[in-house]
Image (cartoon, rainbow, N blue to C red):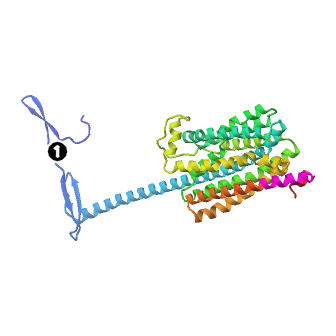
Amino acid sequence: MAKKGKRSNSKTLPSNGFEVTVTAKPKEPTTTQLKNEEGGSGITVVSKNKLKQTPENYAKLREKFQKIEKEKLEKDEAFNKERDERLEKQNNTNDVRNQRIILITHLNTFLYATCFFIQMGSLPYLTKKLGADPVTFGQLQTVFAIAQLIGGPIYGRIGDLYGERRAIIIAFTASVFTYLLTGLSYSLPILFLSRVPSIFMHVMQGSQMVVTFLSTEENRASALSRLGFSYGIGMVAGPAIGGFITANFNVQTAALVAAAGSTVSLVLVILFFPEIPKQKKEVSTAGVLNLKEILSLLLIPKAASLFVIKLVCGIPIGILQSIFSVIAMEKFSLPADQNGMVLSYIGVLMLLMQGLGIKAVTRRLSDVNILKFAAATLILLLHVSFKGIDRFSSATNSLRLLGVPHQFHCIL
């Protein structure tokens, strides 16, 4: 029984006792040009059988093609709608994630500044308690400055290679160890040892990495100024808290409170700070300590001059920050709580400048002119400040000769 199947073009014919299979040549496809009734452009059809040139065939094919075209448009529209919804959802998710990252960054910047100035304001009193003189305190601050100088480029490479999240975790871990060792320091060697973890204590640098990446070029200056505003709030709160703790408890307690605050920041980063996805780009596989990669920054146009300005301005600022509390303690005989209030006053000035001053200046001056203006203002203010200290010292010596108690020197 023959099976029904596809129609075959071959036939089997008997020939002298042999069966010969003859295969018919398939039909060549024919091309039909169907035109509408007006005789305009029509439809070209390629088929096995030639179609009749009738209005019915033209209308039937036209309807079929219109249906196919409609289905295609509907599919494209549905695909585009789904893609737009997916992109919108992804953008909303990214916005929420970025806002959370920015919020945590500002909160941690505030906590970092608060903890830093809690222990910074009490550090001169701790060194004095351990029997150190101002020279030893200067040496301690020099060790801290050298550690920061060495760790800065290395920390930047860590951020490039491993991302901002890991870099900030390392920075807060270094802060915890620095403050913890400071709080446990009952001898000068341990106090000097506490400066070693500060090699990686670059929270502000890591926070600036985050804000710079998540901001656009147009609002980057204002975004960084808001970050400085958060730092300024911590600079106001930290010295006052540190002075209160030192006056009512002891100087070690202030450092331990700073360690506890840094631990809170570390936990916030680990739990709520996600990885920041970046566009894939060619990154050098060289190690963190690769000097060639670090020094290559100097080859960036105008980067070398910017580093020189940073160095020239950073040295006097670092010196002033290092010895200010010593000056307040030795020259003005201020106790820890009053010294903290003076540092908080400086924080208020910085807060106003970061919140209002930078915004006003950036509207009127270019970035280069802002650097020039800041450098000139720094030189002028430092000159006036140290002249004022010299005059106060002369006046204090005169009051001492007159027998006026030192408690009234600051008032007079």
Q: Is residue 293 magenta?
A: no
Q: Residue at x 71, y 36 (%)?
A: 195
- The location of residue 118, given as percent across then percent down, is 78, 46
Residue 393 belongs to magenta span:
yes
In the figure, is residue 364 to the left or right of 259? left
Question: Disc 1 residue type?
Answer: Pro
**Occupied quadrant, residue 165:** top right
Q: Residue furthest bottom?
A: 38
> Which range is magenta?
389-405
Q: Position of residue 176 (x, y in %)?
A: 72, 38
Residue at (31, 62) in percent of width and height:
63
In the displayed structure, would residue 284 be above or below residue 398? above
Nearest the eye: 103 or 396: 396
Residue picked out by circle 1: 26
The quarter of the picture where residue 138 lies is top right
Quick one: SS at disc 1? loop
Q: Nearer the viewer, residue 339 or 236?
A: 339
Residue 28 in the image: x percent, y percent? 16, 48
- Residue neighbourhood size for the residue with mark 1, other residues' Cα within 10 Å, grouped as few (<14), some (14–19), many (≥20): few
Q: In what quadrant of the picture does the N terminus appear?
A: top left
Is residue 357 visible to us here? yes
Q: Is residue 2 left or right of residue 405?
A: left
Q: Residue at x 57, y 46 (%)?
A: 276
- Please name the residue shown 65% across and 47% down the image: 315
Q: Quadrant of the C terminus?
A: bottom right
Query: Is residue 50 in view?
Result: no
Predominant SS of the magenta segment: helix
Tell how many labels: 1
Task: Answer with the quarter of the image where residue 61 lies.
Answer: bottom left
> 82 or 331, which is in the foreground?
331
Front-lying residue, 396 or 135: 396
